[in-house]
Image (tube, grey):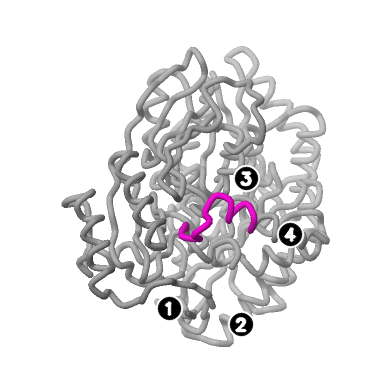
Amino acid sequence: MQFYLRVPYRPIKLRIFYSYSVMLVDSMVDKLEEIRKIFGKRFLDRKEDLIPYMKDASYFEGNIPMAAVIAEKTEELSKLMRICSREKIQVVMRAGGSALTGSPVPYKDSILVSMSAMNQILETHVEDGYVVAEPGVRLDDLNLYLSRLGFFYPPDPASSMAATVGGSISTNAGGLRACTYGTTKEWILGLEMVLPGGQIVEVGGRTLKRTKGYDITALMAGNEGTLAIITKAYLKVWPIPEEIGRILAYFKDVRNMGRSISELKGRGIIPYIAEFMDKLSLETIKKAKNIDFPEGSNYLLMIDIASTHESIDRMLDDARKIIESQGPISIKITRDREEMARMYEARKGLYSSSLGLRDTKDEYIEIGDLVVPPSQLPDSLEEIQDSIGEYNLKAVLFGHIGDGNIHANILVDLNNRDHVARVEKFQMAIAKIALKHDGSVSAEHGIGLEKKELFLEELKERNSMDLLPLMKGIKKAFDPENIMNRGKIFD
């Protein structure tokens, strides 16, 4: 059976094999009733209740699933998966709905599982360096709770207000603090999971050290709901830094900005966060947040330094001197918490504020998510800027300069065939720029539906196409009936 996701002028071809009729014949109605008995009022099959589950935060629009269930207990999910495995019913997981590549977009013959009600922090062991949380816990809520204890959970995607523990594990989310603390996979000690056959298993553990065969815990980071259902996570936590200060440096030239971060890291100064924004980004936040910037600025370098009460001023001054040697137009140090929070929220809100650049209401934002070694940023950014001009597009460039992560918020009119074609060519062009500079086509958003072609391009470029059957073999070992989020990452 073949069908297309409903995206104007951008059909995504998927091949789905079923051993039962796609019509809701009596046998399927019976199976849905079996599932309804497990979840009671948390079983949803009315169209108006299912429509909100058709989209994530990307431009992809899926089909209305057969039904949705709101999970509250691991045992419920175990029963559900036994039924779905037996009847070969596709299952699509959804957490906060903030994914940007179509990962949780459902198909009409699927059961969508919402994890939003599994949102409890179950255990707290800061003396041992971890907490235990359910997958529906929102990251900002987790950090608000931990802050009262003097700790925090470092992964910090821009969507942290909506992003959840389970969703961020499934995409291996990064964020602003990744240049110091890495991505989500570095912060998972262990997981409780429900396998596609319904078995409840635990992988990893509660200790910082363990060696017990293949690391299944790490494998789950970035699996995008294609292997198992995460029902509990053992997460490392870290003490909140005593002091944080910020340097705002505005540059005319991208190379000078890039050299600044290279010099800082080369001298052993690892920023707490290290972000950059291009001129269009600055114009966007000026319009949305009334935050001004010096005339002639083409780039902003935002560096946060974390240290102790005794050393913060010295470290900020050392960092300022290094950045100042690269000739910024303007440079400023601040430790004003309110001022820092205002700029921090403006940076995290660039996705929504970029919508203010739309020429028509039909324009959407498609997000690039490239990564290169930080030393390759100047060349990469120059080439990406040239590509924006070549394809005559409007795109906001920003990202995590400390780890070489470049985001491009690209305005695209999905009702304009020519515009969509140019955006597709641009996405492939900048992917090839990242690969040319020893980078990757996806840094922290995952593959989903959007980046499957780019993912294959990277495998080809690295002479690693033999990894594709290996990955498919792993998928089949976990999910022999191919019911878990079918058609995502690869066909």
Callout 4 amino acid: Leu
Report how far apart the C-alphas of labels 1 and 2 lie in the structure. 17 Å
Residue 375's spot in the image, x, y percent? Answer: 81, 47
Callout 3 amino acid: Glu
269 up-or-down from 440: above or below: above
**Sequence-first tag of 4 and 1:** 1
Task: Find out whether the residues at labels 4 and 3 contact each other: C-beta distance under 8 Å.
Answer: no
Question: Label 2: few (<14), some or many (≥20) within 10 Å?
Answer: some
Residue designated by label 1: 6
454 up-or-down from 145: above or below: below
**Sequence-first tag of 1 and 2:** 1
Asked which secondary structure carries label 3, the reply is strand
Q: Which residues, given as a range, are shown in magenta?
A: 472-484
Residue occupying image coordinates x 59% and y 38%: 216
Task: Give the label on residue 275, or none.
Answer: 3
* Residue nearest the observer in this picture, 188 or 243: 188
> Image quadrant of residue 321?
top right
Classify residue 318 as left or right of residue 170. Answer: right
Residue designated by label 4: 381
**Sequence-first tag of 4 and 2:** 4
Question: Label 3: few (<14), some or many (≥20) within 10 Å?
Answer: many
Callout 1 amino acid: Arg
Residue 24's spot in the image, x, y percent? Answer: 27, 74
